């Protein structure tokens, strides 16, 4: 086992987590451990207060006016399933970008069997949305646009604010997958015209796995039929689903240790500042792109520089097996990456990297310049057969 390990798979999950987050989870489990909405004692009230505080922080981060509209789920995939399957009905039509993750495409493909239709808005081979195509694909039964904020494959950022305005002008709801941007790019639901925002806690929000959620504008609440139902600890005299938030979408016991961890990571983000993290990641991304540009065998996928992107860099290697390169990076140099299709076949088809896929380096603000130089040197040696 190599002593030095360099983690470059932050688009999958962030690591390491902020100092103190794990201790907060342990402290909750060992010293409190209570549920919420079910216990008439102080420890349960303390837990409920922590959950409320976490909703408030998320509401402030994404400029949602009412924190009761912040719903906790296990992850962004669950959030998107609840939104899409509760919102869309037979005969409805939606638009998606051609850069979507399977967290969007598989639920929509499944919904096709019940009469829901969708069209993909084309993107360029760099992952940029061809905005002029939106109007061409509108139909009388188009109900919403569902779109990722940034690609998990190549990091290209899509024009969310511009699409949100388009939705408002055309009477459409706007559903955004913020898996890759929540915690690293500013997101303002009001300014961007976002009606439903799905997020996960374990990527750039720096929380633990198993906690995520979604946020709804008030007008969206009644449009979404709850996918799950059960005990909420509220209005227990009736067997009907509560019609108020957040209980309408939060049956059963939540992942409270996960919310504790997310609470701690959000406080870290508020202290360090998202803009500071983004600037550090973009500096490292620029350095990596510069280093890669000197390797003739390497083809950078997506945007050629650090403009309009996140810290996700995908490459292809001429006349080299990507899986073999990833294996050698890991085993010989301790560099952890991700290779393949990244659960986004539609994006790879758009980027013209299907079915081979790409080798993906995704950076975090804990990475260093020295690590980037080391990665480039390791890649150079592998490509040169050293």
Image (cartoon, rainbow, N blue to C red):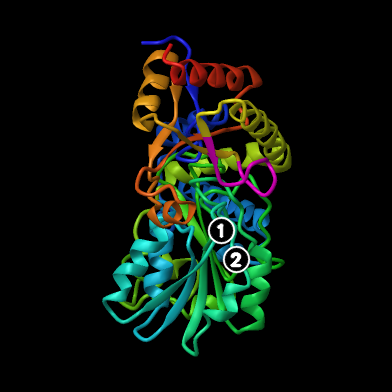
* Name of the residue lying farthest toward the left: 113
Image position of 268 (left or right of 240): right
Q: Earlier in the sequence, mark 1 or mark 2?
A: 1
Q: Assign the C terminus to one quadrant of the image.
A: top left
The percent coordinates of residue 242 (x first, y second) are 41, 74
In percent of the image, x 46 and y 76: which residue is there? 94
Q: Are marks 1 and 2 in contact (CB under 8 Å)?
A: yes
The percent coordinates of residue 311 (x first, y second) are 60, 39
Q: Is residue 229 magenta?
A: no
Q: Neighbour class for label 1 at 10 Å: few (<14), some, many (≥20)?
A: some
Q: Which residue, given by chain and number where applicable, does mark 1 sit on? A: 124
The Cα atoms of the two marked residues, 1 and 2, are separated by 7 Å
Please tell me whether residue 341 is drawn above or below residue 59 in the rendered image.
above
Q: What number is the disc on residue 66?
A: none
Q: Neighbour class for label 2 at 10 Å: few (<14), some, many (≥20)?
A: some
The percent coordinates of residue 131 (x first, y second) are 62, 69
Q: Which residue, given by chain and number where applicable, does mark 2 sit on? A: 130
Give residue 243's quadrant in the image: bottom left
User: Which contiguous range is marked in magenta?
Assistant: 299-310
Please tell me whether residue 318 is drawn above or below residue 180 in the rendered image.
above
């Amino acid at each position: 086992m190599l002593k030095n390990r360099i983690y470059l798979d932050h688009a999958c999950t962030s690591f390491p987590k902020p100092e103190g987050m794990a201790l907060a989870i342990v402290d909750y489990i060992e010293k409190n451990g209570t549920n919420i909405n079910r216990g008439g004692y102080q420890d349960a009230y303390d837990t409920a207060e922590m959950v409320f505080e976490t909703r408030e922080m998320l509401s402030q981060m994404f400029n949602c006016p009412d924190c009761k509209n912040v719903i906790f789920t296990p992850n962004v995939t669950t959030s998107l399933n609840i939104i899409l399957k509760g919102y869309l009905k037979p005969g409805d039509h939606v638009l998606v970008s051609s850069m979507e993750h399977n967290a969007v495409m598989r639920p929509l493909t499944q919904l096709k069997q019940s009469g829901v239709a969708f069209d993909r808005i084309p993107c360029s081979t760099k992952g940029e949305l061809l905005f002029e195509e939106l109007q061409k694909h509108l139909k009388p039964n188009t109900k919403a646009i569902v779109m990722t904020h940034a690609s998990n494959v190549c990091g290209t950022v899509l024009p969310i604010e511009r699409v949100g305005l388009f939705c408002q002008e055309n009477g459409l709801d706007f559903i955004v997958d913020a898996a890759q941007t929540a915690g690293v790019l500013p997101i303002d639901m009001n300014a961007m015209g976002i009606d439903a925002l799905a997020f996960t806690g374990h990527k750039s929000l720096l929380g633990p796995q198993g906690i995520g959620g979604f946020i709804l504008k008030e007008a969206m609440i009644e449009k979404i039929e709850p996918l799950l139902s059960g005990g909420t600890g509220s209005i227990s005299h009736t067997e009907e689903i509560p019609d108020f938030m957040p209980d309408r979408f939060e049956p059963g016991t939540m992942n409270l240790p996960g919310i504790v961890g997310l609470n701690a990571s959000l406080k870290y983000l508020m202290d360090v500042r998202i803009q500071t993290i983004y600037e550090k990641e973009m500096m490292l991304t620029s350095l990596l792109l510069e280093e890669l540009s000197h390797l003739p065998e390497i083809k950078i996928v997506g945007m050629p520089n650090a403009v309009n992107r996140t810290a996700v860099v995908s490459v292809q290697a001429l006349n080299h097996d990507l899986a073999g390169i990833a294996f050698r990076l890991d085993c010989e140099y301790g560099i952890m990456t991700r290779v393949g299709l990244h659960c986004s076949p539609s994006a790879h088809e758009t980027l013209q990297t299907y079915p081979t896929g790409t080798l993906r380096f995704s950076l975090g603000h804990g990475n260093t310049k020295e690590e980037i130089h080391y990665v480039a040197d390791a890649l150079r040696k592998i490509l040169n057969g050293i």
